[in-house]
Each structure stands twice: as structure tokens, then as C-alpha cells.
Amino acid sequence: MNKRFPVDVILQHNVDSTIIPYRIRFTSEEGEKQEYTIKGYTDLTGTQEGTMPDGVFIGFKDYVFRCKLHVGNKERIINLYCKPDRSSWFMTVVR
């Protein structure tokens, strides 16, 4: 199971009721605030119910996004999650 990190997420809310993750902010293990712009994403919301490869159980109503970030000069892939009954977001690092 991958480690889960709580994150702040800035979202774009569209006319068709969809949302797009735009930026994330989190506190690093060293205690520093870090912000990143999402460079690309895949919306996995409602596509499956079960356990993701990173160990997170998701339901059909959970918000799930696989996102691409640039950290320094490296590309990173993360998963963003939010349960509808909670308003907090968390991420796991895929690679």
C-alpha cells in the first residue's frame, strides 16, 4: 500500500458539473509547503469500484484522478482521491 498524503486541491468547476484538478499543495515530510500545477490528468471517477493498485478502495461516487506533475526536471504520476462524504483530498505517488 502506498503512503497517503493529505493535499489541498484547486479545482475548475465546469458548466457540465465536471471538475478538473488544476493545482495541488501539500506539506512535505520536511515541513515545507510545496505547490505544483497539474500538467495532465485522467478522470477515473465512476469507472470502477474496488481496490486500486496503490491499495486505496474506491466506490463509484469517489473522485479519482491520475495526474501528471513536473517535480524539478522529473515527471511524477500521482493519484488524487476524494470521498464524497468527506471534503478532504489525499494523494498517493504512483511513480
Image (cartoon, rainbow, N blue to C red):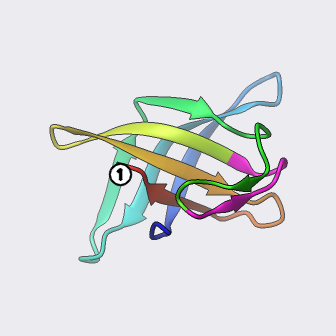
Residue 52 versus residue 55 in the image, above or below: above
Residue at 50 percent across and 61 percent down: it is: 7
Q: 1 or 29, which lies in front?
A: 1
Q: Is residue 63 left or right of residue 7?
A: right
Residue at 73 percent across and 63 percent down: it is: 87
| Rendering coords of residue 71 (x, y %) | 24, 45
Q: 91 or 55, which lies in front?
A: 55
Q: Amino acid at mark 1?
A: Glu
Residue 23 versus residue 3 in the image, above or below: above
Pointer 1 local density, CA inside 10 Å: few below 14, some 14–19, many at least 20: some
Magenta span: helix, strand or loop, mainly?
Answer: loop
Q: Which residue, as the protein is rendered here, is positioned at the far left? A: 73
Q: Which residue is mark 1?
A: 35
Residue at 81 percent across and 54 percent down: it is: 59
Q: Residue 90 appears in which quarter of the rendering?
A: bottom right
| Rendering coords of residue 22 (x, y %) | 51, 37
- Residue span colored magenta: 55-63
| Rendering coords of residue 34 (x, y %) | 31, 58
| Rendering coords of residue 84 (x, y %) | 81, 58
Residue at 77 percent across and 43 percent down: it is: 48
Q: Is residue 18 left or right of residue 4?
A: right
Assign a secondary structure to mark 1.
Answer: strand
